[in-house]
Image (cartoon, rainbow, N blue to C red):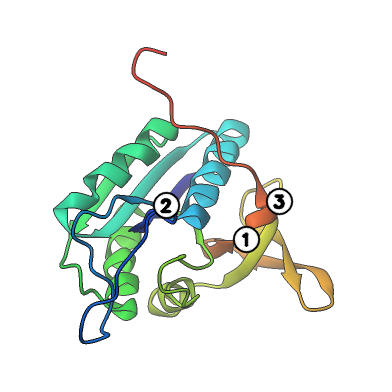
Amino acid sequence: MKILVPIKPVPNPDEKVKIKGDGSGIVLDNIKMVVNPFCEIAVEEALRIREKLTGEVVVVTVGPKESEQQVRTALAMGADRAVLVEAGTDLDLSGGGEGSAKVVADEKAEIVLMGKQSVDDDNNQVGQILAAVLGWPQATFASKVEFAADNKKANVTREVDGGLETIEVALPAVVTVDLRLNEPRYASLPGS
């Protein structure tokens, strides 16, 4: 199974950030960027699925060349390959979704696992935009993902206001993951 995992670099939550003078965003000078925590959970789930079903985990990010460091982190976690689509730092939500959609189509992914939102802008929209652009079904806020025996459908348990619900989606599909899905592994060091 080919699993594509979009990741987003975000400012390290432990660093103090400053707001731009015009209020249009944050000053990124001298700020360490990390992989969005929800994206790390998506990478971890992709790795677990690959371990059970075999296949390939491909990480993709749309952003500036400096995003290579976050891509390396995902590769160190165990992803098989990565694709960096170079774009500016002022990319809007639809640009991120459309850039990822091109890679998904080129890679012929069978499922896209991605964080439900990023911790910097907290929008929770790119997964839905990506599913719409691709014309694929989607399942959001996944806390458990299981596959049918033929790998043509997935049962996704998701968190809703009243508790949990399980929905079935035909593959290929976009699944956004929630915090309770797993605990991401640490990136391995070279030679360990």
Which residue is tagged 1? 178
Q: Within the image, what quadrant is residue 165 found in?
A: bottom right
Residue type at mark 2?
Answer: Leu
User: How far apart are the alpha carbons under marks 1 and 3?
Assistant: 21 Å
Viewer-nearest of discs 1 and 3: 1
User: Going by the image, does 127 lie left or right of 178?
Assistant: left
- 116 lies left or right of 19: right
Which of the pair 143/36 is nearer the observer?
36
Badge number at residue 4: 2
Q: What residue type is labelled 3?
A: Ala
Q: Which of marks 3 and 2 is in front?
A: 2
Disc on the earlier residue, 2 or 1 = 2
Residue under circle 3?
148
Residue 24 vs residue 115, the one in the foreground: 24
Residue 15 seen: yes
Give the percent coordinates (x, y) of residue 95: 27, 76
Q: Does dot 3 land on a helix, a strand or a loop?
A: loop
Q: What element carries label 1?
A: loop
